[in-house]
Amino acid sequence: MILELFRWLQSLSFMTYIRESGLEYPIVMSTHLACIAVFGGMIVITDLRLLGVVLTERPIADVVNGLRWWKRLGFVIMFAMGFTLFGSKAAEYYPNPYFWVKMSCLTLVLIHAIVFRPLVYNHPEQLDASPVIPTRAKVAGALSLFLWTAVLCNGRLIGYYEPPQQKGHVVSTAEGK
Amino acid sequence: MVISLQISGMASKLAILIPGGLLLLAAPIFGHHSVSAEFDVHNQNTYAGVVTKVEWSNPHIYFYVDVKDARQKVTNWAFEGAGPNTLARLGWVRDSLKVGDRVTVVAYPARDGAYVGSAREVRLSNGRKVLAGMPPDQSPK
Amino acid sequence: MFLLLLQNAIADALNSSEWVFPIAECFHIAAFAWSIGLIAIVDLRLFGVGIGHSTPPQILKATAPWTLLGLAVVLLSGPILFLSDPRMYLHNPSFVFKMYALALAIIFNYTIHRKVASSDSSSQGIRVVVGVVSLALWVSVVFGGLFIAFA
């Protein structure tokens, strides 16, 4: 049933257009990658700040509050590009284990946001008020880093997967001989 | 102080990437890295037959050819070519190859014996030849 | 001749395990996300946005060693990828573009960008231009890299 949905998705004219395009497909993918570079880096840096590793001269609140909307902007663009890439060949992604691991990790990222926004990200000044960075902030940062790294690696590996069933096949064998 | 910060930076990067890497162990099949890893680049072959399907798609096109061998056995071979952008630069556009066309495909066969090949060049029945844009040696210059 | 043999030997070693290239690539991408993200944070400050209550020199000083570390990983992992098939890359117009863009981006980052970002007195106009050029150069490198497979 999901496969049917995926087949329908990739049959949409926009998705077909992207799949068969010359420049558009690589431009969509490059934009996805550029977002990973510009905004993904900000996500990593925020998380490492929560872990107390990087930018320790700046208050956590300045880092978290200052980068919040940039990260969200980046995520929106990244997601839009990613969905386009997926949609253009959805049926081909269906058997791809890297795709499913990536989607699972993204779902975990969503859960992470729901759990940790009220605890950590929405009140970063509380973290600065504490003499040591509270454990919940470190946990949030570490989990986020782990999940996003997994998203990145699995995302790249999507392109390496070859389904085990063979594309070519015997049509008819010799008659007599 | 700076050095210890840098080491802890590297350590944290590794600590991040290694568990992230463990998630890579979902990895079953890894066909698609380089042409020489998946295909036998020392055994270029020629396949003649009729085009049955063309998937004009990124990042690689696939076209399928019913190939009849000397003993009349017909096999449907799948051939991989570069993406539409690369092919356009080589003069190969969407309708250059149509279902029903008689073609001769020069390709490297898959190492594992599957009926899949990495196309080097396709010769159409009107004498025209197009390069398939795949490595090695075929990026447009 | 010797270099050719050496290249082939290295290429064979790199291609012998199907994991070397993907792992190097993951490090390459993670490292450039790291470095370009850090540079982008400096550029945001040049635009007057991003991390609050700080000046560009402060952000530059806090990020510079980390950026360098990231670029080091990028420049170590890149050649590993390159050596898997040097001939292909050298003939690939997108790769060639990427190398020029990378050289420009690195030079710009450690000359004009550094000068303007470390000055408390650079004008807002200059800061914006420098930030835009910086982002444009690094994004070009990323695009150049991706287009290698589509050139």
Image (spheres, coloured by chain):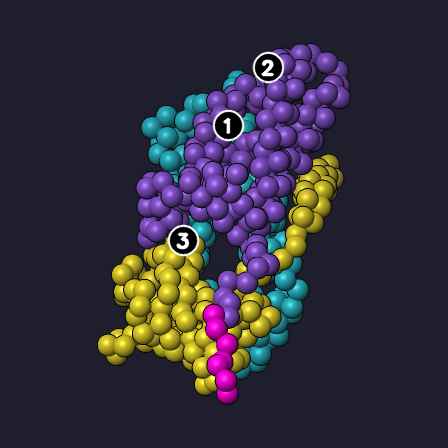
Query: What residue sits right under mark 2 in the picture?
Result: A122
Mark 3 Cα shell of 10 Å, populated few (<14), some (14-19), many (≥20): many
Name above or below for residue B10 compared with residue A147. Answer: below
Q: Earlier in the sequence, mark 2 or mark 1?
A: 1
Q: Which mark is residue A71?
A: 1
Among the chains pictured, the one given purple colouring is: A
- Whether residue B7 is situated above or below residue C63 in the rendered picture: below
Determine the residue positioned at 49% across, 80% down.
A174
Between the residue at mark 3 and the residue at mark 2, the CA separation in whole angstroms equals 41 Å
* Chain that appears cyan: C
Residue C8 screen position, x and y as percent? 57, 75
Give the residue drawn at x 65%, y 20%. Answer: A116
Residue A52 appears in the picture as rendered: no
Q: In the rendered structure, which amino acid carries the disc numbered 3?
A: Asn
- The residue labelled by disc 3 is B58
Question: In the rendered structure, which segment of residues is drawn in magenta?
Answer: A171-177
